[in-house]
Amino acid sequence: MSDPTQFAFTIGTRLPGRHGRTGVISTPHGDVATPAFIPVGTKATVKAVLPETMAEIGAQALLANAYHLYLQPGSDIVDEAGGLGRFMNWPGPTFTDSGGFQVMSLGVGFKKVLAMEAVGVQSDEVIAKGKERLAVVDDDGVTFRSHLDGSKHRFTPEVSMGIQHRLGADVMFAFDELTTLFNTRGYQEKSLQRTHEWAQRCIDEHERLTARRSHRPYQALFAVIQGAQYEDLRRKASRDLDAMRGIGTGSAFDGFGIGGALEKANLGTIVGWCCAELPEDKPRHLLGISEPEDFFVAIENGADTFDCVNPSRVARNAAIYVRAGRFNINTSRFRRDFTPIDDTCDCYTCAHYTRAYIHHLFKAKEMLAATLCTIHNERFTIRLVDDIRASIDGGYYDEFKTEFLGRWQGRIRFE
């Protein structure tokens, strides 16, 4: 039954002198020990990998995309199947995003990494080179054309809530407008107010749908904090969303997502601003982050969970994560390398296959290449965050951070 007490967050060990902590998020479909990386299964699947395999490599929850599932197969079909988890044969907790990311990606054509690194030009009309504007934002919502067939659609806060309720994830996010670092200060302020108004509409609709769908397990609703690189905007958004209540039962948000345009160099600072204003007893999810160095700085500053497509996306393009950094396995130096990807990794791929074989699969354009590399990259990422969590609980976080980052080079350049 739809009971808000089915969702809870319990704090474990605090990181001395910082906002970081361990904890447990409890949901109707199981617990998530935090900090935790939540792999992304955009269309109700982590590309190339079975849900059962994701459980075997340690994934505690999976995140799917409301926009994509709305277009295909349709949220009504997922609802009829019994919700996202049952539809994709995943027994654990699930998350869905709101479609807010597509406001930015369809509107201006930038991927997350560009949103983090774009500097210099300030323009509210900017669009990525070679891209067409497929989404137009107004104060009521977003009108967009499907990237699949060009058909016209409309997302509002109420529509997003309806879709996510039908998808049935344990955690869902309020509909927001994601800006880029190109946008002017004036537009960031306007967008922040719009996202605030949308958040109120989301929590009101969430209350209504929770009451109407009492036959379903409770779904937690997280607000999304915007404000780009501006401290006053980030802090204001955090305070305002924490204070927000639904007009029906007076419910508050169950947790918070930290999103929007995040300067990579200032990631920890921005997360820290938000977490300094947010209540300690609610979880904080950092949207779209998965690089190893980013985990450390974000966790120290208070982030509890993360999601990102990057580990699986780069795997499909032959990019592999190991302790020293990232390299491409489809280069010629690996043709006769009969060692595992990483002899310290405990994943299925490293236990059974060699670099030479995986190199061959990519050169032969075999689908198995994507499967084996995705298994490894997702396990590497999940295991890293698990190790960070263990180091906080064990009281050796700083030593573990120094050791890991001392080896980590980012991109490995072989001589």
Image (spheres, rainbow, N blue to C red):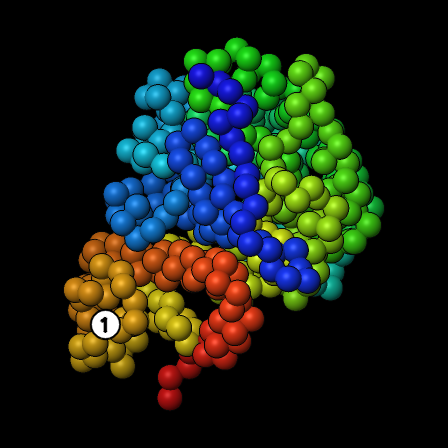
Left or right, 284 with respect to 95, comes to: right
- Quarter residue 256 falls in: top right
* Number of marks: 1
Image position, residue 211 (x, y; %): 55, 13
Q: Is residue 190 left or right of residue 293?
A: right
Rate crowding at label 1 as few (under 14), some (14 to 19) or many (20 or more) other CA atoms within 10 Å: some
SS class, disc 1: loop
Task: Give the amino acid type for the residue marked by disc 1 in the picture.
Answer: Pro
Residue 280 visible from this viewpoint: yes
Q: Residue at x 70, y 20 (%)?
A: 250
Foreground: 162 or 171?
171
Residue 169, position in %: x, y?
A: 45, 30
Q: Report the front residue among 392 and 39.
A: 392
Q: Nearer the viewer, residue 389 or 394?
A: 394
Tell me which residue sits at (62%, 53%) in the image.
Answer: 302
Identity of the residue drawn at 30% across and 53% down:
57
User: What residue does disc 1 label?
Assistant: 340
Query: How far across and how far down the image is residue 195, in percent?
Result: 71, 35
Position of residue 182 in the picture relative to residue 211 (left or right)? right
Quarter of the image for residue 414 reads bottom left
Residue at the outermost top position:
212
Relative to 373, say whether 4 is above or below.
above
Q: Nearer the viewer, residue 191 or 226?
A: 226
Q: Is residue 415 above or below residue 226?
A: below
Asked whether the viewer can see residue 114, the reply is: no
Q: Residue at x 42, y 81 (%)?
A: 413
Screen quadrant of the N terminus: top left
- Picture layout, residue 165 above or below residue 46: above
> x, y percentage for residue 396?
51, 69
